[in-house]
Amino acid sequence: MTPTELGRAAAASLLASLAGLRVIVVGDVFLDRYLVGRAERLSREGPVPVLGFRRSFTRPGGAANPARNIAALGAAADQIGVVGDDDAGRELVALLAQGGIGTDGVVVDPDRPTTVKTRIVAEGLAVPQQVARIDVQERSEVVGDAASSVVAAVARKAATADALLVSHYRSGVSSARVCDAVRSARVDADGRRVLLTADAQGDLDRFRGFDLVRVGRQDASAVLGAPLGDDDEVADLLPRMREALDAGVLVLGRGSQGMSLADEHGYAALRPANVSEVFDVTGAGDTVIAVMTLALAAGADARTAAALANLAAGAVVRRLGVAAPTAVEVLAEIDGHAR
């Protein structure tokens, strides 16, 4: 199914059904900071542009971005993650709360810093261009009381969830222990089944048995130990990877080539919804996992969920920085395709 084949009426109906759902997002939360300047000249000190400062802004990133996407589409989102006892952590929690995202599952660990990713962006070119990024990041596994608090939050919040989404940025939160806790929460005390989804940057075995797993092309290649080849090779490998992982649906992000998926019905490929106005691909995968999680929780099949997510990602890549499209913006993608 292509984005246009989904149809505006069907997309609108599905988007409307997302309201009232609750998704718990577990994973590595970041504070994304942007310093934006206009390119004025080349530096005499080295082959780099000199930027005249224009503005700065911050947004929740990492696992906080799927939560933003969920909230932007009218569903309820609760965040579980770890921040440091620092100004960046307090700013991140405040930004989440301002976005209507529940923050009582965010754990403060005084022994590690909040992850901050500072992007330096040059304007004045054909499109805004990221010229450098500086990360403050601790990748070691969260342990001790902080890890126990994350596990406890998963158990506590799963009782009210329609889905649990693990966003794994390899920064210590989505450990095997936490993923085991997520699997344990799949069926609540009343026998109600909770949807389990994951966006994985490697470590695929941690997400064995999940209902939906998304992985990027580069990370999939690392797991396989060799680059993914042409479309025929992807069509052959992805269903086998899905079976080995015992996943309900396995989605492969393929950048400019769109996405591919394998499910119980076989293999499908979706071309990208937007190929002409790509400003910044940052966060597009977060949007895909968030929208597919919501759509599956609302009862959509995997192909329909992927088509809706493809449209949402098309709206994201035309913006600077991580973004969270609304239902109106997703429908505008269909209108754009129809013209």
Image (cartoon, rainbow, N blue to C red):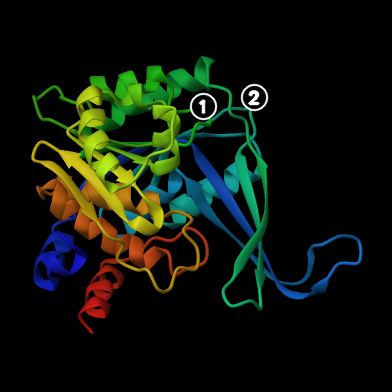
Q: Count the numbered circles shown.
A: 2
- Vertical arrangement, residue 179 with respect to residue 74, above or below: above
**Pointer 2: residues within 10 angstroms few (<14), some, or many (20+)?**
few
**Secondary structure under the numbered disc 2 in the rendered image:** loop
First-in-chain label (2 vs 1) = 2
Q: Residue at x 24, y 49 (%)?
A: 292
- Name the residue beneath numbered marker 1: 172
Q: Residue at x 22, y 49 (%)?
A: 294
**Secondary structure under the numbered disc 1 in the rendered image:** loop
- Vertical arrangement, residue 9 with respect to residue 180, above or below: below
Name the amino acid type tagged 1. Answer: Gly
- Name the residue beneath numbered marker 2: 111
- Vertical arrangement, residue 82 with respect to residue 329, above or below: above
- Vertical arrangement, residue 245 with respect to residue 312, above or below: above
- In the image, residue 163 lies at what x, y percent? 23, 38
Q: Residue at x 12, y 30 (%)?
A: 193
Q: Is residue 12 left or right of residue 221?
A: left
Frontmost residue, 60 versus 216: 216
**Pointer 1: residues within 10 angstroms few (<14), some, or many (20+)?**
some
Q: In the displayed image of the protein, which residue is found farthest to the right?
A: 44
Frontmost residue, 56 versus 300: 300
Q: Quadrant of residue 114?
A: top right
Report the Cα–Cα distance between label 2 and label 1: 13 Å
Q: Is residue 212 visible?
A: no
Q: Is residue 69 left or right of residue 226?
A: left
Name the amino acid type tagged 2. Answer: Asp
- In the image, residue 252 lies at what x, y percent? 31, 43
| Label placed on residue 304 | none
